[in-house]
Every structure is written in C-alpha cells, then in structure tokens.
Image: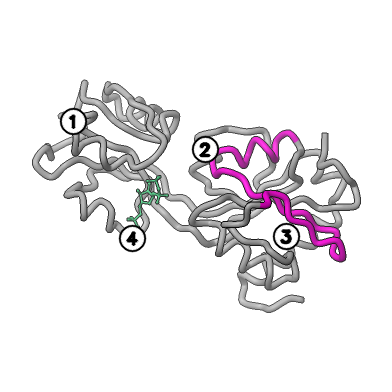
Amino acid sequence: MTSVDMNYLTIALPKGKLFKPATDMLAQLGYSAEDLSENSRKLVITNEDAKLRFIITKTSDLPTYVEYGAADIGVIGKDVLVEDKRDVYELIDLGFGFCRMVVAVPRHLQREKLSDYAHMRVATKYPVIAEQFFRDKGVQVEFIKLNGSIELAPMVGLSELIVDLVETGRTLKENNLVEIASVLPTTARLIANRVSFKMKFERIHQLTAGLKQQMEGRVVK
Ligand code: PRP
C-alpha cells in the first residue's frame, strides 16, 4: 500500500526537535508548503503546485505511517527506528539532530561499575534498546516504561537509573544526574515506504540526491 495518490509525494514530519531542521533542509530544495508549521492545527498540508503533501505526526508514530504507506517518506531519529523496528527503508543520515542515548543516575547513587546497579530499576522511553544494552552487559535490571520527562523518575524514587537521550547535557545537569554509560549515538534519518520507494523512485531519488548534495555543501535547486 502506498500513499493514496500516485501524483503526490507524501512526507511525514515529526513534531518536536527535528521538525524545524527537517523543514529548513527540505525548504532549501523547494519542498515546502504554505502554513507548514509545527503548531499548525492542520495535520495534512498540501502544496498543489509541487504535488507535495506533508503530514505532521507524533514522533514515535512516524515510522508506522511510513511502514503502512500513509506517507511515502519521513524524517525520524535513529533512536526511534532502532526502538520501533518498523519495516521501512532507511535512506540517508541527514546529519542533524545529533543526540546520545545514555544511562544516567543521580550523583549520590553513583557506583563504580555497571554491575553494581544489578536489580535496580531503569526508567526509559526506550525499553527495547535499554533491555538489549543491559542484556549485552550481563546486568539484570527492571525496566519501567515512561513517555517523557524521564529525568523525573529517579528524583521521586520511581527508579534509580534512567536511559534517555542527551543533547546538550543541560537536563541531566539541572537534575543532578550523571552519565554512567553510553548506549547509542543518534541522528535524523530519511526513511521510505518500501513500495513507494519503487513506485515513486524518481521523485524520492531526486530528493535524496538533493539532500546529499546539500549536506556536502553544494546548494541544489
Ligand atoms: C529530550 C530528552 C531529554 C532532553 C535532553 O527530551 O529526553 O529530556 O531532551 O536534552 P538536553 O541534553 O539538551 O538537556 P524532550 O525535550 O524531547 O522531551 P521529553 O522529556 O518529554 O522526552
């Protein structure tokens, strides 16, 4: 199944930190639409002249829209792709949205090595990645799935540890948490629906090539 109309290219964009850099990058190549804004009440925004459609989704849902062909392509963090394991093509690393997924702990609970945290609780939005990480390290812990503001969990005794994304490090610092292990580096990726990639190859290829050239510092129009 592909995005409803063969004449349109449907691009999924996630709300949140990746929205602005993604739309800026696409706009430089002429992929934009009037009223395309993160705060728009309209969730489907069309550029009739360019035969483009943008849909704005919740970050964690974006790969689902692309997998089922409700969007042909989308921009999403590698963290979400690894966690969600959707059946989509990962086309290119867009080189923005750089974050690190880390294990962190309140400073006063800091121990010497990872195995010293055995049987403690880990709060995270990324239970699949976190579980894999601790399994690989041979450390048994308990996971608590949360949907946001993960740093709150150890402050109120919900968990001892967290696995979360760090960008500037400010949130960890302000909540007196210290990083004790690195789990996964992540950046924004361009993904495509498998059928769309074949059916709309020319359009998707043209966009991908433009984005690559843009990243190499050449302006393409
Ligand atoms: C992310 C992440 C951290 C914060 C890290 O949260 O989960 O909380 O950003 O950024 P920093 O290192 O620059 O401080 P986000 O703002 O996406 O919201 P969330 O807490 O609801 O997941």
Residue receiving disc 3: 208
What element does badge 1 sit on?
Answer: loop
Quick check: 126 above or below 186? above
What separation in Å lies between label 1 and label 2 (alpha carbons)?
Answer: 28 Å
Q: Earlier in the sequence, mark 4 or mark 2?
A: 2
- CB atoms of marks 4 and 3 within 8 Å: no
Q: Which residue is mark 1?
A: 157
Q: Would you say the beta carbon of the disc 1 residue lies within 8 angstroms of ligand 1?
A: no
Question: The magenta stretch spans which residues?
Answer: 42-68
Residue highlighted by disc 4 = 168
Disc marking residue 82: 2
Give the residue displayed 77% in from the left and 76% down from the top. Answer: 221
Please state the horizontal and vertical placement of residue 39, each as a whole percent of the image: 57, 57
Mark 1 and mark 2 lie on one chain; the one further toward the N terminus is: 2
Residue 60, position in %: x, y? 54, 39
Q: Amino acid type of disc 1?
A: Gly
